Image (spheres, rainbow, N blue to C red):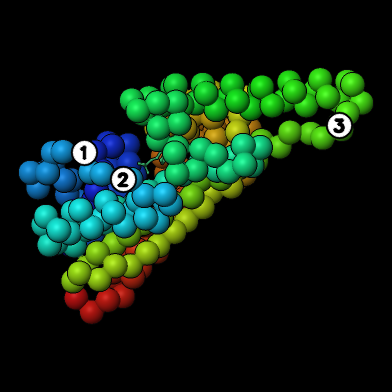
Amino acid sequence: MKIVFATGNSGKLREASEILGGGFELVTPAEMGINEEIPETGSTLKANSRQKAEYLWDRCGCICFADDTGLEVDALGGAPGVHTARYAGEDKDFNKNMDKLLHELSVIETEVRMASKLGLSMKKVSRRARFRSVVTLIIDGEKHYFDGTLEGEIARHKSGNGGFGYDPVFLPDEFPGQTLADITEEQKNGISHRGKALRAMAEYLKGRDM
Ligand code: IMP
């Protein structure tokens, strides 16, 4: 089945192809002649994912899907969330984003350590976080939503060469002591937010009378 995936991110495309397997041929917007950046101006992951999928549907009228992913860090009140891609600026630089995240957490930890020394607080800073993905599939003009989450913690330092985005600073619960960039792509896809959402989408498509 040919299906257009609203991404220009080669890491995401590779993951999605592996997760969906042989029955699906993923086509990029560029391969459909859509070269501009697809807008994502919503205030939630679902709104952004829907907006990207609708943008494609309006231009090609073919089966298409988009995902939007956010990283929620408890100690930051759920930030960066919907702002994950542009956390450190409009250039969406992965390294700057991770550096900002590690810096923000270390500032909070220093403040809490000081407060604790002064006897003002005994609180420990949680590094708990999760990735959340929302996928919007449009088929015959109808929208379908699938989601997935991955629980873990933010590491103190970057580690690993695999994956993309924030993978080097995310320690999934399933692989203690290793970041998503330390484990293999197959291991990541087996547990990831995107893996869960896309497998649900694939099940839906396989179960549909095409
Ligand atoms: P978007 O959903 O493509 O807009 O991605 C939002 C942000 O999350 C970008 O900075 C991505 O690099 C990051 N991101 C999305 N998926 C993953 C992932 O699986 N691992 C690490 N970072 C990710």
Name the residue tied to disc 1: 37
Q: Residues within 10 Å of mark 2 (few under 14, many from 20)?
A: some
**Which secondary structure, mark 1?**
loop
Marks 2,3: beta carbons within 8 A: no
In the image, residue 86 lies at what x, y percent? Answer: 40, 32
Which residue corresponds to the image point at 33% horizontal and 45% vertical from the top-left? 41
**Foreground: 152 or 162?**
152
On residue 83, the disc is: none
Alpha carbon of mark 1 to alpha carbon of mark 2: how far? 9 Å
Is the shortest distance between ligand 1 and the CB of mark 2 under 8 Å? yes
Q: Residues within 10 Å of mark 1 (few under 14, many from 20)?
A: few
Q: Which residue is mark 3?
A: 121
Q: Provide the residue designation for mark 2.
A: 40
The amino acid type found where label 1 is placed reads Glu
Q: Residue at x 79, y 34 (%)?
A: 124
SS type, badge 2: loop
Q: Does the image show residue 5? A: yes
Image quadrant in which the N terminus is located: bottom left
- The local secondary structure at tag 3 comes to loop
Disc 2 marks a residue whose amino acid type is Glu
Residue 147 left/right relative to 119: left
Question: Going from the N terminus, do you reach mark 2 or mark 3 first?
Answer: 2
State left or right for residue 204 relative to residue 70.
left
